Image (cartoon, grey):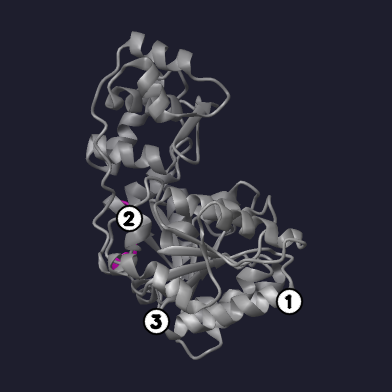
Amino acid sequence: MADGSDAHRPDQTSERFDKLRLIRSANIGPISYFQLLARFGSAGAALSAIPDLAGRGGGKAPRIADAREIESEIRAVEKLGARHLFVGEGLYPALLSQLDSAPPVLIVRGNLRLLDRPAVAIVGARNASAAACRFARGLAHDLAEEGCIIVSGLARGIDTAAHHGALGQGQGGATAAVIASGIDIAFPPENAELQESIAQFGVLIAEQTPGREPLARHFPSRNRIIAGLAIGTVIVEAAPRSGSLITARLANEAGREVMAVPGSPLDPRAQGCNALIRDGATLVQNAGDVLETIRPMSGHVRQRATGWRGAPVDADASDAERRTITNLLGHTPVPVDELVRQSGLHPAVVATVLLELELGGRLERHAGGRVSLG
């Protein structure tokens, strides 16, 4: 069950409180958050250094989250029976912590011990066919019986069917729902009862703060968590431009297994899955196919997270080096590796310049390790 006790409650003198202030400050994303911690050793020291770093990047110092805002968030989370979970803490999902863009803090409610189980994501079309929903429900049921936890996004269609399949078969609520809103917001509204059931018997996970309505930009971020939690992701039904294909791509980028259920070439809702299979995704017809695919990786879920393992960013950059990187950047996203290659600079120097630009509000980060001018 979720634990809202004082043992998990950041106070204003704690490093956890400073970490929450850091990630809630303007222009701080997961990658910049981890780089700041690696460079300065603590969240408190990072908060003090932000204005100077932003100035070096030619931008204004970002707004630092006020301590009163953080206190208000903590009270709201506690009132909901939830808790904050930081990267590096024992219950933070080990596989998720391996992502460079792992959420520094999650807001969670439910039985976190379920996340010890091998996780399989099942996602697909919102306007799914009845046959596809039936298949997703049955697949989730069978995988739950085999000891897996089913991860999905609580959307209409395939997501809903997968959650019901895992919840309704006496598996102790072996499902995790990752939502794009605050943990107190039910979306879609018709899934309010299902969301509460998952919070009671499974695990409900949010990156957004309480009260935050879901916005379009939150869904790709939600999808990266779904993909990051799971050993493998199964796409049951997806049109060519489906958001589920974003989850499949993110899973592939994270080195996880991508699986898909084939469908009729005459059904547009099957075209995305058929394309994934054509491009190398594992074809899935039953739970046995999934279990065979994930078995080589299943031992990794037993490894506990020990914190972000990125390289420290401790290199200073000269004005000339800053100009070199800035001149290479444009409004079209470019891979960071390409910036390193074209600039001829040490990767740590490039990372330092990008961090300064991001803190100054002049840089945007994109999926796949790409960046552009903000």
Amino acid at pointer 3 = Gly
338 or 293, which lies in front? 293
Disc on res. 87? 2
Compute the Cα span from label 2 to label 3: 25 Å
Q: Hey, which residue is sitting farthest top in the picture?
A: 320
| Residue 8 counted in the magenta span | yes
Query: Which residue: 41% across, 25% down?
Result: 338
Location of the C terminus by quadrant is top right
Query: Which residue: 38% across, 57% down?
Result: 96
Magenta stretch in the rendered image: 7-12
Task: First in sequence, mark 1 or 2: give its number.
Answer: 2
Residue ID for mark 3 = 147
Determine whether the residue tagged by mark 1 lies in a helix, strand or loop.
helix
Q: Hey, which residue is sitting farthest bottom in the picture?
A: 170
Q: Give coordinates of residue 248: x percent, y percent.
A: 53, 55
Q: Nearer the viewer, mark 2 or mark 3?
A: 3
200 over 120 or under it: above or below: below
Q: Are marks 2 and 3 in contact (CB under 8 Å)?
A: no
Disc on res. 130? 1
Query: Which residue: 47% across, 49% down?
Result: 69
Q: Quadrant of residue 210?
A: bottom right
Is residue 347 found left or right of 287 in the rendered image? Answer: left
Q: Are marks 1 and 2 in contact (CB under 8 Å)?
A: no
Is residue 126 found left or right of 336 in the rendered image? Answer: right
